[in-house]
Amino acid sequence: MPHVQPAEILTLEEARILQERLGEPLRPGLSPTELDDVESQFGFRFSLDHRVFLTAGVPVGDRWPDWLHGNPDHLRKRLDWPVDGLLYAIEHNGFWHDSWGARPRVLSNALACARRLLAVVPQLVPVCGHRYLPGVAGEAGYPVLSVYQADVAVCGRDLRGYVRREFGGEPVEDSGGGLGLSGAPLGSVSATSPSAGVLGDEPVGGVREVEFWSELVD
């Protein structure tokens, strides 16, 4: 497995620049106390990059979770979506991960076994739509993952890379060499880009592993 050097933590200045690209209304950012309250209420932890992003501002729209004013039941469903999707795939599509050992023959037992094993993998926290960041407290530089049942894909080597590509029109990495479609290294920014010299680089050496979830990436 290649060594991945995590990028530096997202800064508030970077987060504000990235949020300008979204084309979405923004509410004022969350305070440290408000972020802590969200974590306590829903039982997860934001990664460092995610905390900085939400401190800079909170995007408003159906795709974006509104942690302060949103419906708590809807927010819980979004937090449960990745695991619920895998359980659906187990029940309806015959999915079973190799690391789980032999699949129980009775469906109810298979679902109970999967729930138990999935309870200890990193919590995925919604960023936008079905794009998720792992909720690893005190850590930065994890990839943004697209999660739909057992189909998982990398949408950016980190949060800054995800926004650059999904909302800023910068080239996405190919499936092999980790280069943008332009042939530029994935962490690079064109010298003519308005963000050159302002936005930091992405992780060097590949995509940082997320326990269990990275094993589902095609």
Image: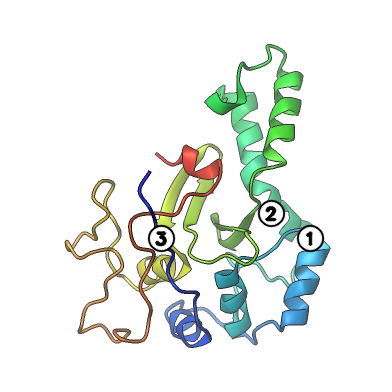
Residue at 49% over, 77% down: 10
Q: Amino acid at mark 2?
A: Leu
Residue found farthest to the top = 105
Q: Sequence order check: which comes first, mark 2 or mark 1?
A: 1
Observer-nearest residue: 106 or 179? 179
Residue 173 vs residue 114: left or right?
left
Observer-nearest residue: 108 or 53? 53
Give the total number of marks visible in the rendering: 3
- In this view, the mark in front (3 or 2): 3
Residue 156: numbered disc: 3
- Residue 121 position by quadrant: top right
Residue 42: numbered disc: 1
Q: Mark 1 and 3 residues: CB-CB less than 8 Å, in contact?
A: no
| Residue 158 coordinates in the image, percent (x, y) | 45, 64
Secondary element at image label 2? helix
Where's the N terminus, which quadrant? top left
Give the Cα distance between marks 1 and 3.
25 Å
- The residue that label 2 is drawn on is 79
| Residue 155 coordinates in the image, percent (x, y) | 42, 57
Give the Cα distance between marks 3 and 2.
20 Å
| Residue 99 coordinates in the image, percent (x, y) | 56, 27
Give the Cα distance between marks 2 and 1.
9 Å
Secondary element at image label 3? strand
The colour style of the image is rainbow
Q: Sequence order check: which comes first, mark 3 or mark 2?
A: 2
Q: Mark 2 and 1 residues: CB-CB less than 8 Å, in contact?
A: yes
